[in-house]
Image (spheres, helix red, strand yellow):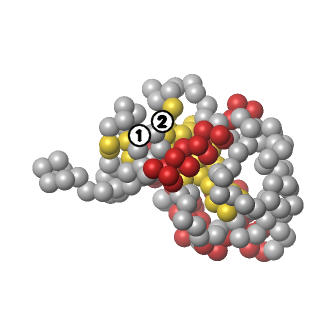
């Protein structure tokens, strides 16, 4: 059975190594969010660097998730002292569990504060795509899909909650989100 890959990306207002209270708060909330999401039904796993040092993303060993990569529009630092981004790469069983994990509880609280920590941009901050069972998406896959979404909009290759697709490429809609179906198809 296919799995749902999710790549998220945001440019932070300050580097990860910044000792400011807001940066520490982001990290503290982030660690709690990860713990909570990892217990959510439908969650399969996420990319985690060996060693897990704060801010060491580009040099880290990501194992099967591949070499770390970022979208072409990221124009800040690449060292532990200058990196100013937050990104995730994860696998889910389906759209509904991912939606429920992201838009409820502690993660929802963090989303409500995202503009305290992240720069506002014209770029998408997440993308979904389907992978075959047993396939682990790579960071480069996530970047490629996010850039495709930015350049071409939602399609079976790269999509969002609001314009989502089933594993066979058919447009789909989760109840309560996305565009309304035309009359007669509701």
Residue 161 at x, y = what percent?
Answer: 42, 52
Residue at x 17% of width, y 47% of height: 185
- Horizontal and vertical percent position of residue 6: 55, 45
Side of 4 relative to 26 (left or right): left
Examine the rendered structure and indicate whether residue 121 appears above or below residue 137.
below
**Viewer-nearest residue: 59 or 101:** 59
In which quarter of the view is residue 63 placed? top right
Query: Can you give x and y, in whole percent of width and height, for residue 164 in the image?
Result: 39, 47
In the rendered structure, are the residues bearing label 1 and label 2 in contact, judged by CB atoms less than 8 Å apart?
A: yes
Front residue of 115 and 32 = 115
Residue extending farthest left: 184
Residue placed at 39% from the left, 55% from the top? 162
Q: Of the residues tagged 1 and 2, which is closer to the observer? A: 1
Instruction: Answer with the quarter of the image where residue 117 lies.
Output: bottom right
Q: Which mark is residue 102?
A: none
Query: Residue 11 sits in which quadrant?
Result: bottom right
Image side of residue 56 versus residue 74, left or right: right
Residue occupying image coordinates x 36% and y 31%: 168
| Numbered mark located on residue 130 in the image | 2
- Report how far apart the C-alphas of labels 1 and 2 lie in the structure: 8 Å
Q: Secondary structure at mark 2?
A: strand
Mark identifier at residue 156: 1
Question: Residue at coordinates 32% horizontally, 37% vertically from top-left?
Answer: 170
Residue count near mark 2 (Cα–Cα under 10 Å), binned few <14, some 14–19, many ≥20: many
């Amino acid at each position: 059975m296919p799995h749902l890959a999710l790549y998220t990306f945001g440019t932070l207002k300050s580097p990860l190594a910044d000792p400011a209270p807001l940066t520490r708060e982001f990290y503290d909330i982030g660690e709690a969010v990860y713990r909570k999401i990892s217990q959510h039904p439908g969650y399969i796993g996420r990319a985690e660097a060996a060693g897990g040092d704060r801010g060491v993303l580009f040099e880290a060993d990501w194992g099967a998730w591949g070499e770390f990569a970022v979208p072409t529009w990221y124009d800040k630092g690449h060292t532990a002292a200058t990196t100013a981004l937050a990104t995730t790469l994860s696998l889910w069983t389906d759209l509904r569990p991912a939606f429920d994990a992201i838009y409820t509880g502690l993660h929802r609280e963090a989303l409500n504060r995202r503009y305290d920590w992240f720069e506002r941009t014209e770029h998408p901050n997440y993308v979904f795509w389907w992978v075959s069972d047993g396939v682990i998406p790579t960071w480069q896959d996530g970047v490629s899909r996010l850039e495709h979404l930015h350049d071409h909009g939602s399609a079976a290759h790269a999509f969002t909650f609001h314009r989502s697709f089933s594993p066979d490429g058919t447009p789909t809609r989760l109840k309560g989100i996305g565009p309304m179906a035309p009359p007669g198809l509701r």
